[in-house]
Image: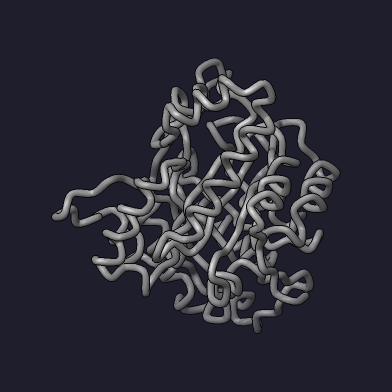
Amino acid sequence: MLAASPLHAREYQEPRAVVDTFQTALNTSDFTITSEILLGASSGADHISEQAELLRDRVDGVLVTDNQSGRLHMSSLAASRLLLEAGVDPIMQLGCRNRNRVALLGDLLGAGALGVRNLQLVRGEKVPIGFAPRPEAMLDVTATELLGIAEKMKLEEGIARFPDLFLGGVISPRVPRADWPAKKVVQKVDAGARFLLTHTCMNVDVIRQFMKHLIALKLLHRTSVMVSIAVLASAQDARWMRANKSNVIIPESIVERLDRHAEPRAEGIAIAAELLQLCAEVPGLAGAHLYAPTDLRSVPEALDMAGIAGRRAPT
C-alpha cells in the first residue's frame, strides 16, 4: 500500500496536543455526548476557537464535518487540529466523494501525524447545483472500503508505530423486520468501525426498535452506536432538513410543535432535551450526537434542560 522509506522507519512521536475524551467516554460513561461545530466558507481559526470555547467541558467530542451538504469550507483536518489546540477532542469526518484513494490516504496519515485520532469515514455528499466551475464527480472507494484500508494501515510495514486511529462511520436507523440482516452495518463493523453515529433521528420508537435489533445481532460488543439529534430553531428548518437531507427522520408531530409555538427556538431546545432524556434510557445506545443547524448556543442550553452532560476525561 505504502512504499517504505527511511522517514517511515523513525520512531513515532506523540504530537504535543493530545486530547482523548471521546474514546474514553465511550469506554467509561453510560451516555456519551458529542456535538459539532458550524463551518462555512468564511470560517477561520477565530470562529473555530469561539465554538470550541462554547462546547469545551460540555461534550466528550466534537464532529468536524467534511464539506457538509457538498458546500465549501475549511478542510476538516485543519479544523480538527485547531480544536485540539483549543483542548477539544475532534472527530474528523473524511468523505470519499471527490477524492481518490491517494488523497484519502494522505489525509489519514496527516490526521495521525497531527494527533487527530477519531475519524468518521463517510461517503460524502454531492456538490450542490450552482457550484461553478463544477468539479468532476469521483468515488474511488466507498466508506466501508476506506474503513478497511484505514484499519489495515495500523499494521502496514513501515508505519507500524502509526497511532491507533479510532474509526467510525454513519448508519441509517430504521424499524427493522425480524429477519433484517443489517448487512451494511455489519460490513462497517467488520471493516473496523468502532463507533457509529446515526443519521438524524428524532423518533425514539424507531431508535428503540433499531437498537433492540442490533443487540439481537450481537453487534454492540464490537461497536458503539450514538443517535444524532438536531436542536431545531423553527418548523422551516425541520421541513428543509426533511426535504434536502437524505435519511433524516423528523416526525410531523415535532414540526407541528415548532409551528404552533410562539417561540420556536425555545421549543426546539425543549424537544431536544426531551429526546435526550428518552434516548438515555434506550438499552444499548451509547450516547447522543446533539447538534444545532443554525445556533450552536442552543446545544449547551438543551443539555442543561435535559440534565445531561458529557463526562470529559481529566486533562
Q: Is residue 149 visible?
A: no
Decide: is 291 above or below 71. below
Q: Nearer the viewer, residue 152 or 272?
A: 272
Q: Picture coordinates of residue 245 (x, y %)?
A: 46, 30
Q: Picture coordinates of residue 304 (x, y %)?
A: 71, 52
Q: Nearer the viewer, residue 238 or 110?
A: 238
Q: Is residue 228 visible?
A: yes
Quadrant containing the C terminus in the rendered view: bottom right
Q: Picture coordinates of residue 96 (x, y %)?
A: 46, 46
- What is the quadrant of residue 13 in the picture? bottom right
Quadrant containing the N terminus in the rendered view: bottom left
- Report whether 175 appears left or right of 29: left
Residue at point 47%, 52% (across, down)? 227
- Report whether 226 appears left or right of 38: left
- What is the quadrant of residue 291 in the picture? top right
Q: Nearer the viewer, residue 189 or 134?
A: 189
Q: Nearer the viewer, residue 182 or 174?
A: 174
Q: Picture coordinates of residue 196 (x, y %)?
A: 44, 58
Toward the left, the furthest residue is 179
Residue at point 16%, 54% (across, down)? 178
Colouring scheme applied when the structure was drawn = one colour
- What is the quadrant of residue 44 in the picture? top right
Toward the bottom, the furthest residue is 11
Residue at point 52%, 60% (across, down)? 287
Decide: is 277 above or below 160. above
